[in-house]
Amino acid sequence: MTELTIDPDKPVLIAGPTASGKSALALEIAEKQGGVVVNADASQVFDCWRIITARPSVEEEARAPHRLYGHVAYDQSYSAGHWLREVLPLLKGPERPIIVGGTGLYFAALTEGMAEIPATPSEVRAQGDSLSLAALTGALDPATAARIDLNNRARVQRAWEVLVATGRPLAEWQDDTPPPPLPLSACTALVLNSDKAWLEARIRRRFDLMIAEGALDEVEAMRDRYDPALPSCKAIGVPELMAHVEGQMSLEQAKEQAAIATRRFAKRQRTWFRARMSAWQAITPQG
């Protein structure tokens, strides 16, 4: 933070790939300038995980106010729309928000605006769950298909659900997006631009630390409630460690598979940030 000039009167946004040091930077800013640290990571909202999702520790949370961490039940759905509705009151609160995380859609909703799409009926979601990725993709209109990652089933199914539930393509809803709640001109927006090799080494070290701090116990505690279809149970590292506690792979295999999954996830994050956050201030983390 030493080299950064941060306006203490403006909200701060900190985006970056997993394991890049975002939370440490947010806490440093909060301790030096004041403010409340607000979560913008989709996995860290769930109450069942702390260690495996690298949620701030109890000790770290005691050093500055934290919001929107671990407040959603493990079996509940949670979307960018849910997050935006919860973060808006914090923008008007008495403390300056320092919003930190790796979920790009959350930041896009906040700084670019979000289409006011009606909730998807459960029967439409169930129908989408039963279809193949090819079937879902084939039903999309060209404009929507050109805007989303067609290899990402969750994104494709969401677009399909919007089309079926509302009769309007997702692209049309997006084109009617209202003004952003927090334009970039009204905040300090930082994106961590980490070196690939540096980040991979950090990922491996952090996972070893998670194991040492009790990640296996955390996963074991969820064993009877684990459902791979739940968003909470798709958190990076969870499927791999669950396979280990169930005797399906060794700890070393689980660690290697989790490292590979994390590396791939970080690559997708970096690609998204480069494409969507070119106007943000890029900083290179160190240490």
Image (cartoon, rainbow, N blue to C red):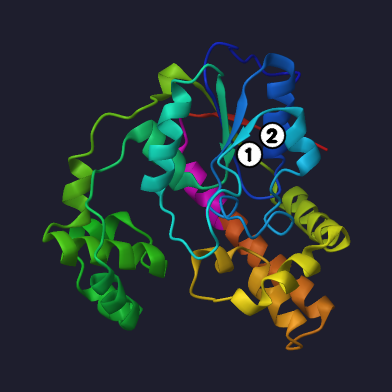
Residue at 46% from the left image edge and 61% from the top image edge? 76
SS class, disc 1? loop
Q: Which residue is mark 2?
A: 284
Disc 2 residue type (three-letter) = Thr
Q: Is residue 153 visible?
A: yes
Whether residue 272 is in magenta: the answer is yes
Mark 2 residue element: loop
The residue at 38%/61% (across/down) is 149
Q: Is residue 276 visible?
A: no
| Image coords of residue 125 (percent x, y) | 29, 71
Closer-to-camera residue (116/68): 68
Q: Are marks 2 and 1 in contact (CB under 8 Å)?
A: yes
Taking the image as shown, residue 156 lies to the left or right of residue 235, namely left
Residue in view at x 72 percent, y 40 percent: 21
- Badge 2 crowding class, 10 Å Cα cut-off, few under 14, some 14 to 19, many 20 or more, is few
Left or right: 246 in relation to 101 = right
Measured along the vertical axis of the image, is residue 20 above or below residue 282? Answer: below
The residue nearer to you, when weighing 185 against 248, is 248
Range shown magenta: 268-279
| Neighbour tally class for label 1: few under 14, some 14-19, many 20 plus, Cα within 10 Å | some
| Residue 223 vertical placement versus 88 (above, below) | below
Residue 166: image location, x then y, percent? 14, 59
* Residue that numbered label 1 is attached to: 193
Q: Amino acid at mark 1?
A: Asn
Calculate the distance from the C-alpha at mark 2 to the C-alpha at mark 1: 5 Å
Is 277 or 247 nearer to us in this picture? Answer: 247
- Which image quadrant for residue 233? bottom right
Q: Earlier in the sequence, mark 2 or mark 1?
A: 1
Q: Position of residue 95 (x, y in %)?
A: 56, 19
Q: Residue furthest right?
A: 212
